[in-house]
Amino acid sequence: MIGRADEKGFRQLLPGIQQRTPVFGTQMLLAEFRLAKDAILPLHNHPHEQIGYLVSGRLRFTIGGEVTLVAAGDSWCVPGGVEHGVEVLDDAVVVEVFAPVREDYLPDAGQRR
């Protein structure tokens, strides 16, 4: 499966937080996020391991109760089941991989493999 660079497929998850899934496999999923300054992703957890890379912008990331400022070029790993959340300090682009596949991030059924 090849994911193409385009503007299609973004959906708003929360105010100021847009997500699309460029490509996915049987064991993992790649997600792109566009985050608007001052948006908040509240503390939450899920069973998926999550590895991310901040392409641009700045974030205040909370992982397991520890607060860290994250700048473009930084990366992270959030183990499954660990509470985490984000405050967006500047407009940002994030790329993340989730394993196993997040069913809620899969594109429409007609696009599945």
Image (cartoon, helix red, strand yellow):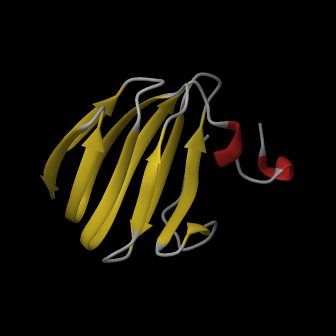
Residue at 40% x, 65% y is 40
Residue at 38% x, 23% y is 79
Q: Quick one: 83 or 16, which is closer to the camera?
A: 83
Q: How many marks?
A: 0
Q: Is 104 placed above or below 4 here? A: above
Query: Looking at this rendering, what residue extends furthest in the front direction?
Result: 65
Image quarter of the C terminus? top right
Residue at 78% x, 50% y is 111
Residue at 65% x, 24% y is 26
Whether residue 8 can be seen here: yes
Q: Quick one: 4 or 76, which is closer to the camera?
A: 76
Image quarter of the N terminus? top right
Q: Quick one: 63 or 73, which is closer to the camera?
A: 63
Q: In the picture provided, is 10 more to the left or to the right than 87?
A: right
Q: Quick one: 91 or 95, which is closer to the camera?
A: 91
Q: Is 8 placed above or below 97 here? A: below
Whether residue 73 can be seen here: no
Q: Is 38 placed above or below 50 here? A: below
Q: In the picture provided, is 11 more to the left or to the right than 83?
A: right
Where is residue 63 drawn, in percent x and y? 29, 37
Q: In the picture provided, is 36 more to the left or to the right than 6?
A: left
Residue 55: which quarter of the image?
Answer: bottom left
Q: Is 13 placed above or below 38 here? A: above
Where is residue 12 drawn, in percent x and y? 60, 70
Where is residue 46 drawn, in percent x and y? 54, 32
